[in-house]
Image (cartoon, grey):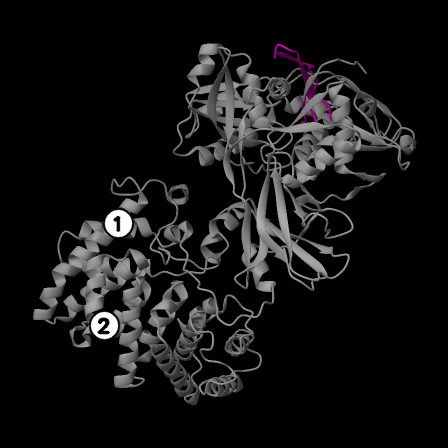
Amino acid sequence: MTLISSAHVGVLLDGILDCAAHARDSGTAAAAHAEPTPACVVTTGAPGERPIAGRAAFESLAGRGWDGDCGLARHPILPLLESLDGAADAIAGAPGLAAADLVAAHVEAVAEGTGAHRVVVVPDTLGEAGQQRLIDGLRRIGISAELLWRPVAALLGWALGLSDDHVRSLAGTTVAVGHAGFWRPEVSILAIDVEEVHGKPYLVPVRSGRGQAPALPATMEMQALNLLAQDLSEHGVSADLAERLVWISRRPWATMCGRPTPQEIVRDTGGRWHRLHRTEPAPAPMAEILAAALAASLDEVTERRPLAAVAVEGPLAGLRLPDGTRLASALAGSRAGGRDAVALPPDTAALGAAHYAWRRSVGIVGYYDSLPDLRIQAQELGRPTFISLMKGRDRVAGGTTVGPDLVTGFSIAGGTTEVDYALSRSDDAMVRKTVTRLPEPADRNIPITLYVTQKPGQGFASVEIRPPEGERLADRPVFLDWSSMTSTGLGEDEYLRTLRVELAWPDPSPWPSRAIVWKAADIPRTMHLFHLACGGLGGKLEFAAKDLMSALGKKPALDWPLKKEAPEDRARMAGGVTKAGVFDSDGSIPAEEDLRELLGAPPGGFKTYRQLSDAVLDAAAAAFERLTPKLRANDEKQLRDLHRQLMLAAAWSYSSTPEPILDYLRKSLRSPWTSLHSGHDYKAAGRCFSKPDDIALLFKATRDHFALKGLQTPNDRAKALSLVLMYRADAPAALNRRIAGDLAGTAVALMEQQAGLNNIKNTFFAAAQLLVGLLRFRMIEPDFLDPERDRLVPRVRDVLGRAKARIRSSDSKILPVLEEIEAFIDRRGTNGLLFEELDKLSD
């Protein structure tokens, strides 16, 4: 081993062309060049004995089949690197060691030096579990190392060869970096800052989220196996040897890199030796495969983003396609390509990592990263929820530890013997959990302070739980380290649903919107056609209004439109909900970037989708206003239908419903004889009324209607009130005791009527949804519908009992809902999603 004394060492992990670079005090770096070699680590099987790594491991007899393998086990590095993000299982033939331990031994061998500051280059898509395992594996052999994202390292290495003027010219631009290598090809987009230090410009990449790893038609190992099998056959050797030799022979990997294949001698299973002759570089089969995969990812992630350059790094970046062009040039010429194409040498990222280590030592920013939100589950106002511990940050200097942030206001309840801690992160779909047993039951509420730290790209966040000075929560300090917590396999909403907290009323359940619904229902086209048709009141507008009403009223389950999307994108597009609409109940549409990602630019020359939706709502309101006086003078069915469709279409925008339509609905409810659409007016008002005075008007008008006409046409009116109570957090404040009691009595009478008809269907559940919604009035008056004293409660229990008797015992969906209604009446509800369940059953 050659020892190179350097304070700053960059290590590039690839599995085939791993290398190290060493930076001097001036900040420049020189890399140790390597030939394509399937790196490996060899273990002896003896517990506690350190693995053999580096050249000695590759040249050992392990795995060659020459002498019974001498009791040694060969572990190729490339599969070990891929396994860092997977389960941390023990490695066969390496007792007591995990994949990260073997990778750490390999890093030590590649570094070949006594560097005090090692920086290890990792893929832009390596998850936090993989980061943490690698860091922990290095620590176990006494190496303190920092990880650096591969595209960041590549840009820093590239900038070392640029003139100062060129570096300055990149300020404020965006660059695509493609990795053409063996460990996880990927594409990343980074913004570029430039910082001047003592008159010299330094390029500073700005990372905002993970890159994208394209799917390849076959693994790198399979590509190498196929090449080696063909190579052996051409030399008269059985292709069956390929599987045993693929991690021993340099030949297939050299071919994949477009380099000459070295001469080698191999031994077959019969003990015969064969010479495999050196061959000149042949067309690299990986070039076309990688070019197609990376170009597809580049097109996807760079759409609508102008690029200053496309930089391609990695051992395969210089490959030539059959037409003679280099892989980098092919990417730059793709649909989303940039103006300049740069094929970087294989050691560029190692050079950049060493230079980054030097920058860190002299206080020059190396790059900027982002941090996700970190949240903890706690009880707030008597309800389980997730509370922010550390807000996400869009811009954090790389290598910087953020925090500790001190978060107060938490306490552990008296009498507690063990505490469940659950954390969630905005960049991880699953909640993680751990349990701490207290040394003795808490004799009172114990206030606690949470100390939160995060470091971008360096494994998991950490949360320390501290009691008041002089007290303790366990036998040792309590740290919530994400890496040591257990995944629950549940998202936030699902996890909260498992917490059996007794509730006296349900929380409001605002209606969400999602971009995938816009795509599935073809909303931009429908809106655009309606806007075009609003020039007159002819047949075109009639059809366009009907189509718009139908499209905006879509409330699909998201599973079927998401089936057409990439599996890795589905959770992000769903955003934790199973159903969604075009507008949310606050009148907002999905985020502009989400809509553009799925749909491209808005039609009709509109700059944003919000401009398009606003223009459509304004046009609908104008047409509605023009129609109203005509309809009062001439009650023609065609005009009435169009007028109703315009009103209902606009009302599907919820709180964004235009004022002319809101004014009409107010007049209709105050003076029912002026109503043009009866129950439809109520349905519209239930969706779009959000101001306290409007909500109070809807409650009073509905109560007066039922008092005057009894249970005639009840469904629309009951549903309207249910939606207001479901969507609007402050709706209970618009009630008074008398109106709330009258409406609860009407809801129970309607449930009794439908149960008597053996009709446990949508009208029954609309009334039940109203009754459950009215329980939210307990926020104002806690003794409302008191389960022990209110004379209405026995009727509720009776009608629910009759309904359950009429439902088949095998109906697993409806029976739990009926039981949960009774539980809420008795102040022991547990299903925070009951509103949503009743909303589905009443539609």
* Rendered residue at 21%/73% (across/down): 670
x and y, in percent, of residue 790 in the image: 46, 85
Task: Answer with left or right where residue 772 lies relative to residue 690.
Answer: right
Q: Hey, what amino acid is under mark 1?
A: Asp
Depicted 155 relative to depicted 138: above or below: above
Relative height, residue 155 to residue 656 (above, below): above
Out of 722 and 349, give the one closest to the viewer.
722
Q: Kindly identify which residue carries mark 2.
A: 669
Q: Do residues under tags 1 and 2 come within 8 Å of each other at their CB atoms? A: no
**Residue 1 locus on image (x, y percent):** 81, 16
Q: CA distance from mark 1 to mark 2?
A: 26 Å
Q: Is residue 488 visible?
A: no
- On whether residue 13 falls in the magenta region, the answer is yes
What residue is rendered at 64% in x and 40% in y? 460
Q: Secondary structure at mark 2?
A: helix
Q: Which mark is residue 614?
A: 1
